[in-house]
């Protein structure tokens, strides 16, 4: 039986078995490579997506728990910005723009989760302090968001820059 | 997701099979290569080895003026794709935007060795610079002929050659045809030799600028194809069920539950579950009952230091001058102590992943994030007992790697080839988090017995550093050893002392005791607790002990740690980085510990300094931190690094490498330790082996000391080395307590504060 999701604004009927974690549905069935497999244990954050309930990890929870939800991956961030701000065409979300301006990624593997969590943070707190940014990435979710290349310093600057661009 | 030859992500074989090879390839591959590929395919050699002395191997100038440059090195996130493009464009006098760098596709890109040890710019970049200079000379010779003017009267700007009002672009001159160098390229033991002279550094306009990295926009858009994202037609997903103990072998393999959509594959001790859908493979691997033999060849992590000392070692003298024993015996004061570094993880955020396609005709394509595609290619040819020309390795971006995929070229790829061979279809192997934490070849644990003798005036008269090192260059790949396709043994990995000594101490003795891996003697696979290169291997451990012990001597003799170092250094570049770091950090010149140091209530602060010469690059670091003795919590508040890497290619990329070194190493120093029982590693996830969080990030200041006339050296590793000892010394400065065993977790610090 198909499960209905809205992914990046598009209605999808997915046929993966209901116990499949959402991550495998997004990557395998829907061909979205933004959310990444990092641990399968909700311990690193690289699989994060935005849902109606905020940023969520997708590597453990089955797709059935997301039935009917609006899901946004990094691929859908520009369209989300268009919708939120009623702008005609956004090539990039301001968060992505800030990530480029601050030259954040090194290997880039974890940055999906970093940008998703930034979108979630700025939706709730449009002008966060450094301490609030650190909290959002360190202690507010199921685990800290981990970056092995050590880009935390650039991420903090990019979140502040994104907040400016979105103001 | 589309596959793009220009970015090096499409198998040439795929193109040939599609029958559109010449048309599709014309954009990226020169005529000479195309001809050779077509001929080679006809002759049954699918993947010829690129000839390094053929200019056409290195670059193609397309009709529209764009230039494809090919390198055997790969991007690990450090920005070398961009830096190489800067160096090549500079030398060719071409626009930066016109140069695209293709990396690590073994039948197209030249073998320039492994991307490791911060060598891309220093070695591969220097080679590229020389060959680009030769390419420019070749292009100018063509232009002189075309314009009927003397070659030495030509000028070039943005890829357009001019003589007065006469102009011709590189694109019109070449039109994608293969270039033949005006002076043959010679490569021998001494290096690369070309007829052309590279541009003087004083004329550089592109090198030295913070050009935005070319890979970042795609990474931000999530358009970069990581190896984890590769999907090829008819591909199966596989999870490997690795042995219970490091030396365990299969006793029995059960069945998957009825209704499972996966299949079991067993090749000797390589047990895997494969399925059309990845989740079915993941579930199947978790559900498959496998009984393994007991194996208990490890000492257990509580006991490893004593066990390491008892292993049979080969002793290497790294340095010896004067007579240490006599000078130490005659010393007025002596210091003796031991430092210890733990086994560590590389900790790639994305666990190992690779795709292999072993075809019926014997040809093989492997998609991998290896740091050495040509090395992996040879390794796969060897394990399948076929010619390297039957194998193609296509490199794609991976999840960091920090040495994990260097000597150990790619475990997942080595497993995928056997599974693909058996199943007759392309197979993608994705390791689980537990696989990666347990089975990655770890950073080696080490011990350092230090001894110093001082005369009555407090001068150092004797210095000894006795290092016991687990190997840091294990190059075994799991696949063939589990399958039994390769005999155990081969090259014995060793731990290597890395790095020169700049301190002027008389009567010096430095020894490295090279130990085998724990369990290698009793494991049927020939390897034990595998350990290999981890960012700044060898040097990281050596510098920790050396620099912290230097601080101990300074403290014992009541000297400022900076002044003590400057007194014993003569190298002006070393002195310059130390002074630059101290100045930028606001170093307080005084002995350690500080007068009000203590372990009482509240919070105490401290400063620490360290220096290293690594990969030809000089780095000095100053650490400032706060210690709360009651809880053992240490908070890094500010880290300053001054670095002299000779010529600067891209300042911002270097600064980001320094901050990367600072943050990653702070994680290693404060949190990381691989633990194991007698059978295998027990730290199997990010809870049992945690890493630094964002809320522990210090303020980081970087100072790049300019030295444009000196050839560029590595920037990916040097700053790693200044962190451990500077942190140890700053904790000592704050509290008067010296920590000598990493990691400095809160529990360890609290216990030490007594």
Image (spheres, coloured by chain):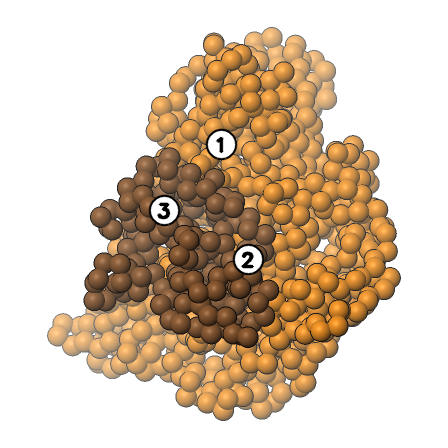
Chain colours: A brown, B orange
Q: Check the image and report above or below for B20 versus B465.
A: below
Q: Do labels 3 and 1 share a chain?
A: no
Residue drawn at point x = 47 percent, y = 81 percent: B33
- Chain containing mark 2: A
Q: Earlier in the sequence, mark 3 or mark 2?
A: 2
Horizontal and vertical percent for residue B715? 45, 46
Viewer-nearest of labels 3 and 2? 2
Q: What element carries label 1?
A: strand
| Residue B5 seen in render | yes
**Residue B501 visible (yes or no):** no
Residue B646 x/y as whole percent? 39, 44
Q: Residue A61 carries which label?
A: 2
Same-subunit check for callouts 2 and 1? no
Quarter holding residue B579? top left
Q: Name the residue under label 1.
A: B611
Q: In this view, does A41 lie above or below B560?
A: below
Inter-mark Cα distance, 2 to 1 = 48 Å
Quadrant housing the C terminus of chain B = top right
Q: In this view, does B505 lie to the left or right of B161?
A: right
Q: Residue at x 64, y 42 (%)?
A: B688
> What residue is shown with label 3?
A121
């Amino acid at each position: 039986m198909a499960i209905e999701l809205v992914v990046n604004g598009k209605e999808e009927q997915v046929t993966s078995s209901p116990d499949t974690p959402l991550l495998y549905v997004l990557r395998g069935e829907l061909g979205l490579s933004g959310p990444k497999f990092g641990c399968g244990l909700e311990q690193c954050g690289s699989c994060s997506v935005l849902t109606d309930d905020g940023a969520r990890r997708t590597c453990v929870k089955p797709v059935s728990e997301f039935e009917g939800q609006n899901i946004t991956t990094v691929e859908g961030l520009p369209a989300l910005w268009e919708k939120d701000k009623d702008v005609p065409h956004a090539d990039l979300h301001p968060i992505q723009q800030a990530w480029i301006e601050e030259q954040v990624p090194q290997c880039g593997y974890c940055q999906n989760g970093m940008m998703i969590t930034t979108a979630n943070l700025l939706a709730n707190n449009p002008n966060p302090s450094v301490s609030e940014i650190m909290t959002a990435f360190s202690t507010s979710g199921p685990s800290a968001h981990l970056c092995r290349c050590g880009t935390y310093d650039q991420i903090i600057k990019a979140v502040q820059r994104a907040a400016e661009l979105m103001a | 997701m589309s596959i793009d030859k220009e970015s090096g992500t499409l198998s040439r074989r795929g193109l040939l099979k599609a029958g559109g090879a010449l048309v599709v390839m014309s954009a990226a591959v020169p005529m000479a290569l195309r001809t050779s590929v077509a001929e080679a395919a006809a002759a049954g050699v699918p993947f010829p080895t690129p000839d390094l002395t053929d200019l056409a191997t290195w670059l193609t100038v397309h009709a529209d003026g764009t230039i494809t440059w090919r390198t055997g090195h790969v991007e690990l996130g450090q920005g070398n794709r961009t830096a190489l493009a800067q160096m090549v464009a500079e030398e060719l006098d071409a626009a930066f935007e016109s140069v695209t760098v293709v990396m690590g596709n073994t039948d197209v890109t030249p073998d320039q060795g492994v991307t490791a040890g911060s060598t891309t710019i220093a070695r591969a970049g220097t080679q590229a610079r020389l060959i680009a200079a030769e390419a420019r000379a070749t292009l100018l010779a063509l232009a002189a002929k075309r314009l009927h003017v003397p070659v030495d009267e030509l000028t070039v700007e943005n890829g357009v050659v001019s003589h007065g009002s006469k102009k011709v672009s590189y694109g019109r001159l070449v039109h994608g045809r293969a270039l033949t160098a005006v002076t043959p390229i010679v490569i021998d033991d001494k290096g690369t030799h070309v007829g052309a002279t590279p541009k003087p550094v004083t004329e550089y306009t592109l090198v030295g600028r913070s050009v935005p990295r070319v890979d970042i926009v795609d990474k931000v858009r999530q358009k970069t194809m990581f190896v984890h994202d590769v999907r090829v037609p008819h591909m199966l997903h596989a999870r490997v069920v690795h042995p219970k103990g490091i030396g365990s072998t299969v006793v029995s393999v059960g069945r998957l539950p009825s209704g499972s959509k996966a299949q079991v594959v067993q090749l000797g001790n390589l047990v895997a579950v494969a399925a059309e859908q990845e989740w079915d493979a993941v579930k199947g691997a978790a559900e498959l009952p496998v009984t393994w033999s007991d194996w208990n060849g490890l000492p257990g992590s509580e006991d490893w230091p004593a066990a390491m000392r008892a292993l049979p070692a080969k002793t290497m003298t790294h340095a010896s001058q004067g007579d240490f024993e006599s000078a130490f015996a005659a010393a007025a004061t002596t210091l003796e102590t031991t430092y210890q570094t733990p086994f560590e993880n590389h900790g790639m955020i994305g666990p190992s992943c690779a795709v292999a396609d072993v075809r019926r005709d014997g040809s093989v394509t492997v998609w991998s994030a290896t740091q050495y595609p040509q090395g992996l290619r040879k390794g796969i040819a060897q394990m399948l007992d076929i010619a390297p020309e039957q194998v193609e390795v296509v490199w794609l971006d991976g999840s960091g790697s920090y040495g994990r995929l260097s000597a150990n070229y790619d475990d997942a790829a080595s497993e995928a080839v056997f599974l693909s061979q058996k199943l007759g279809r392309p197979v993608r192997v994705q390791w689980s988090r537990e696989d990666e934490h347990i089975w990655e070849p770890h950073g080696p644990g080490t011990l350092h017995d230090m001894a110093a003798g001082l005369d009555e005036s407090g001068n150092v008269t004797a210095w000894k550093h006795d290092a016991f090192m687990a190997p840091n260059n294990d190059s075994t790949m799991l696949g063939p050893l589990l399958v039994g396709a390769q005999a155990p043994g081969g090259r014995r990995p060793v731990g290597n002392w890395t790095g020169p000594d700049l301190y002027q101490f008389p009567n010096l003795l430095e020894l490295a005791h090279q130990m085998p891996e724990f369990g290698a003697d009793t494991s049927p696979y020939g390897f034990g607790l595998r350990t290999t290169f981890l960012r700044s291997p060898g040097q990281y451990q050596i510098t920790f002990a050396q620099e912290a012990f230097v601080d101990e001597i300074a403290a014992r003799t009541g000297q400022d740690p900076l002044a003590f170092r400057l007194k014993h250094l003569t190298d002006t570049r070393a002195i310059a980085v130390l002074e630059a770091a101290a100045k930028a950090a606001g170093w307080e010149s005084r002995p350690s510990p500080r007068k009000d140091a203590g372990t009482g209530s509240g919070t105490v602060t401290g400063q620490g300094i360290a220096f290293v010469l690594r990969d030809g690059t000089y780095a000095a670091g100053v650490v400032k931190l706060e210690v709360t003795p009651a809880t053992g919590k240490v908070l890094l508040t500010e880290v300053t690094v001054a670095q002299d890497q000779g010529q600067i290619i891209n300042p911002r990329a270097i600064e980001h490498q320094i901050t990367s070194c600072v943050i990653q190493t702070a994680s290693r120093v404060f949190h990381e330790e691989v633990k194991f029982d007698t059978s295998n590693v027990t730290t199997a996830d990010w809870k049992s082996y945690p890493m630094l969080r964002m809320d522990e990030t210090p303020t980081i200041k970087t100072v790049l000391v300019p030295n444009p006339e000196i050839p560029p050296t590595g920037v990916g590793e040097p700053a790693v080395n200044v962190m451990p000892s500077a942190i140890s010394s700053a904790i000592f400065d704050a509290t008067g307590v010296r920590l000598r065993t990493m990691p400095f977790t809160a529990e360890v610090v609290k216990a030490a504060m007594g």
